[in-house]
Amino acid sequence: MVESSSRAVVGVFTYMDDALEAVKSFKAANIDYRMYSPVPRHEIEEVTYPQKSPVRTVALICAITGCISGFALAILCSLDWPMRTSAKNVVSIPAFFVPGYEWTILFGGLGTLASILVFCRLPSVLRAAGYDPRFSHDKFGVVVACPGNQVDDVRGRMLNSGADEVDVRDSL
Amino acid sequence: MEHTHSDKPTDSETPVSYAEVNDTVLKMLEPPGTGWFLLLFACLFFLAIGASCWFYQMWSGFGESGKSHPIGWGTYITNFVFWVGIAHSGTLISAVLYLFRAAFRQPIYRLAEAMTVFAVMTAGLFPIIHLGRPWYALWLMPYPNQRALWPQFRSPLLWDVFAVSTYFTISATFFFVGLIPDIAAARDRATTKFRKALYGVTCLGWRGSHIQWKHYQAAYLIFAAFATPLVVSVHSVVSWDFAMSIVPGWHATIFPPYFVAGAIFSGVAMVITLAIPLRKAFGLERLITPFHFDAMSKLILLTSGVVSYSYITEFYTAWFSNNPFERFQFWFRPFGEFWVAFWGMTFCNCIFPQLLWVKSLRTNIPFLFVLSIFINIGMWLERFNIIFQSLTREFIPAAWGGYNFSWVEVGITVGAFGWFGMWMTLFIKFFPSVAITEIKEILPPPMRRGGHGHGHDHGVAVGSGH
């Protein structure tokens, strides 16, 4: 629960390893943080979020659902209006591979889109406390939301890690 | 500084930094000049021609298009296959080459992806135009109706509906997801209310936190994995529109790989056609270097070889089959009424691209621009040859016929180029047409300790990233 006097301490870093140094310091002290970067890097991922993303599982489930749905659509529609064409069976599994295959990809792709929106919390309509437009340009950022009495400690950790500047703002 | 050879930039050049990537690409979004407006006006003019012709066709009847017995499929289906083929290369570059970690992909893939989405949008117009009564287009979809009818799931034409609509949906989604971080960069630099609102809404509030990047990277890889089989499957399904029939010249098992290779061939050529003027107009020489053109040229050489081999195989199998109808069809193509189209196709697709064996020509920008246009002419002629020539000379002489192009179908063909051009022109001015984030990914990150971080020398003038 965020205290009413909660502040956002924003560290702006030019060098990635400085930002990672700060993150490691916060992790060691069990302080919650958020790191912003203009580009995804595996070095950042290894430090901040080494576990696997659940996006893959969601995509797999949706793809399997799509495959079953594609075949089911073709089979059920054919059985509902059983018209023999070109001497083929009414339920022609080789022919129905195409809708099954396409819906596997369609459902899998749309499921992946849904999962990225959910897990990345998009669309995000609230202003992100501590976000700086330079983080999409060429700077790295580390933001810590903390009570007022911890601001000096957090600021010190960031400056010791090599932050170019440290700003203290009101957090939402 | 322009490179004079296809090797990667030397270390003596000023390295590209993260800031420079942002500045160079986002500069393209500045208010447009006269040239952009002229280009947009030209596209809208052609589009207006196409729209007028289409309305005239709907008013007067489908016969105005020139389609009749025996050529029931003509220019519209040729255009449909042409545009779907163009689209495939974009997905190859953005998805397949992502999975293979190809070295030359990053600076050109956004343009290629945009080309894919707009080309599929263009292709999708033609089955609807070809219906004659486009208001019946909804009947292609399987929905419950009072006629108690369902579409025919054993028909390649319905497979096309599934394939092309899935391809458009996944391509557009993949395209949009890849754009999100770059639109956020544009949002952070926007100065006008309109652009702040446009980018703020379309980037969905993206901030680039470590949590977002983690899920984003996982999702992007999954998208690439889903889009990759579409490159092979969609144009294979389109080829089955022909191969599943018994028409001489159509009923061939080689059609799926033949069409897919041809699609990549024409698509890469179209990427070159678009990339060269874009690079020149916006000063992208440090991002799109001769290294990238050399790589694309090699891809063109490879696919030209596959397409040429496919042509030879078609002739050989027709001769070997001893089937008189197949043999006649493949005599008629080079020596019959439409011999110009056949030899034009052969020159543009098989002979002219062989000049790319010469290394200096692979990075000769004016030559590549001319070649890319010839290739697309050749690929349009290939679809013309397949469709028109086979239909004019089917099994018995009673089924033979000639063809005269109508001004309506020519106008609609021109309009399609205007439609495609309009979307590309709008896109390059409103959204980043070079992938900011992915170019930064291949640059070494700025590191205070331990020298430069792990980056990849991918032809972009690399450096400290700072």
Image (cartoon, helix red, strand yellow):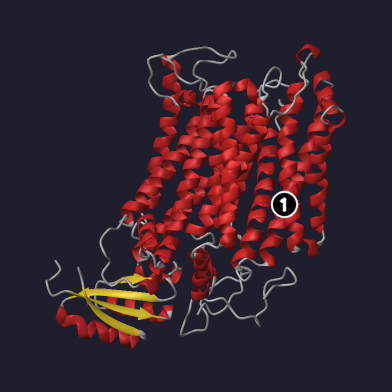
Rendering quarter of residue A148: bottom left
The reply, left or right, for residue A97 in relation to residue A64 is: right
Identify the residue under disc 1: B372
Rendering quarter of residue B388: top right
Instruction: Name the one closer to the observer, B243 or B101.
Output: B243
The reply, left or right, for residue B298 in relation to residue A91 is: right
Q: What is the x, y in percent for residue B130? A: 58, 27
Q: What is the x, y in percent for residue B51? A: 56, 35
Classify mark 1: helix, strand or loop: helix
Instruction: Name the one closer to the observer, A116 or B437.
Output: B437
Q: Give the residue drawn at x 61%, y 81%.
A: B14
Please state the total of marks drawn on the protein image.
Answer: 1
Give the class, few, some or many, for how many residues have Cα within 10 Å of label 1's Cα (few <14, many ≥20). Answer: many
Marked residue chain, label 1: B
Rendering quarter of residue A80: top left
Instruction: Name the one closer to the observer, B187 or B171.
Output: B187
